[in-house]
Amino acid sequence: MTRVFAARLVGCSVFDPNGDRVGKVRDVLAVIRSHAAPRVIGLIIEVPGKRRVFLSIGRVTSIGSGQIITTGNINLRRFEQRGGELRVMAELLGRKVRLRDGSGEAHIEDAAMEEVGLGDWELSQVFLRRPKTTASPFAKGATVFAAWGDLIENADPGEAQSATQLVASYADLLPADLANAMLDLPEQRMIEVAEELSDDRLADVLEEMPENEQVDILNQLDDDRAADVLDAMQPDDAADLIAHLSNERGEALLELMEPEEAEDVRFLLSYAPETAGGLMTTEPIIVSADATVAEGLALIRRHELAPALGAAICVTLPPYEPPTGRFLGMVHFQRMLRYPPNERLGNLLDPSLDPVAADTSAAEVSRILASYNLVSVPVVDENHRLVGVVTIDDVLDYLLPRDWRSTSDERPAYNDTSTAGLPLKERSAHNGTH
């Protein structure tokens, strides 16, 4: 009998019979049965393009050594959860349960799936962690294995299930991938995960989400937490998000933000959204003409700097915070690599790159970036002071349809049961089949 833990499958590569990699596992899909352990019906895998698709367990020929082998037949339509289906990582791990033997409560940390027949898998056991018994922050509760039938879901009304384990399983995901994973979750579960993330991590994720979901999540946070998250966001993204809140909430959050961050956001909100001023970020690298190549390269090496902002350095007269003194020009990263470390950046300005005015239309900015193969363009005010830069990712967000993150084909329904979204104890009264 083969037994595999679901959490250990996450991130495993999926290969076709020819050895070509087709994706990686993101979750295990099961259906609840009333008098038996849940039946595993397939895997949710992420294929190139960040699309999540369903892979039937019947098309899996081998599981082991950190890889999955399939028959090669994969339906590339986007996964959509159906009634009666349970995503093990997203919905089961972290749940609080009670043991039928009366020994108390525990949280589910993992689930073991076993092959009970040819191509027939079920969730036979769960790995539980009991509450810790000491106040030490380093202590952990005891662990125990239990059969599915030994569990009773905690019935305390209104108590949210722990999202800690789920957040831990997402630790290696890039912000865009984590945003996609959260968008696939039920709404309440998505909010639970958002509340569990650190301010910086949640800020990065919100920047990758559609506007409606950004607003939904921020509206579930108290004002102090919401302001902290906005502080951690890029000013242009924070301004876009605040613009979609009510005037009262937006102003309240601006008052709670750090003064410097709030000032940047207010500055950006003063521009029309579909202009260079509305698209730009106010945090480019800005130096004096006397700065050297060595100093410029050191600034570009900063880990937290977005690649598009690190592609070029802005040179201005003092002051060096937007709005700066008179804008002198930009120096591209590649040009700096061709000169000795002590070369002055003022000698390396690109004479062919003209800045755009803050009221230039977004369409014109897009044309300029495309025509001259640029990844960023400087933005100046009427006095030729640098106020920010528009980067290629800002323009792509403008050009793509608003629902581009969620636009895709849908896979056909596999059943018509109506138990999606029900608690575990209620779903267990139904049978779902794929």
Image (spheres, grey):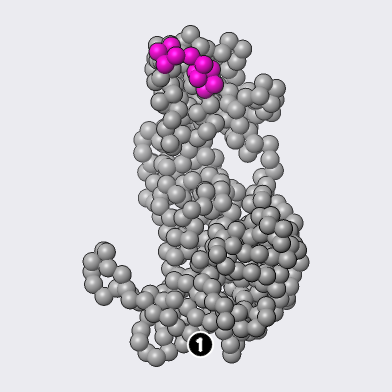
Tell me residue 419's x, y (percent): 63, 77
Locate residue 312, reporting x and y percent. Answer: 52, 23
Q: Nearer the viewer, residue 125 or 428?
A: 125
Residue placed most toward the observer, 53 or 329 = 53
Quarter assignment of residue 196? bottom left
Q: Position of residue 119 (x, y in %)?
A: 67, 77
Q: Residue at x 73, y 73 (%)?
A: 414
Which three-letter amino acid code belongs to the residue tagged 1?
Answer: Gly
Q: Is residue 78 left or right of residue 424?
A: right
Viewport quadrant of the N terminus: bottom right
Is 328 on the left-hand or right-hand side of 392?
A: left
Q: Quadrant of residue 420?
A: bottom right
Quarter of the figure that contains the C terminus: bottom right
Q: Residue at x 39, y 17 (%)?
A: 319
Q: Is residue 248 above or below residue 306?
A: below
Q: What range of the chain is rendered magenta?
A: 333-343
Tell me, yes or no, if residue 242 can be seen here: yes
Name the residue beneath numbered marker 1: 149
In this view, which residue lies farthest toward the left?
135
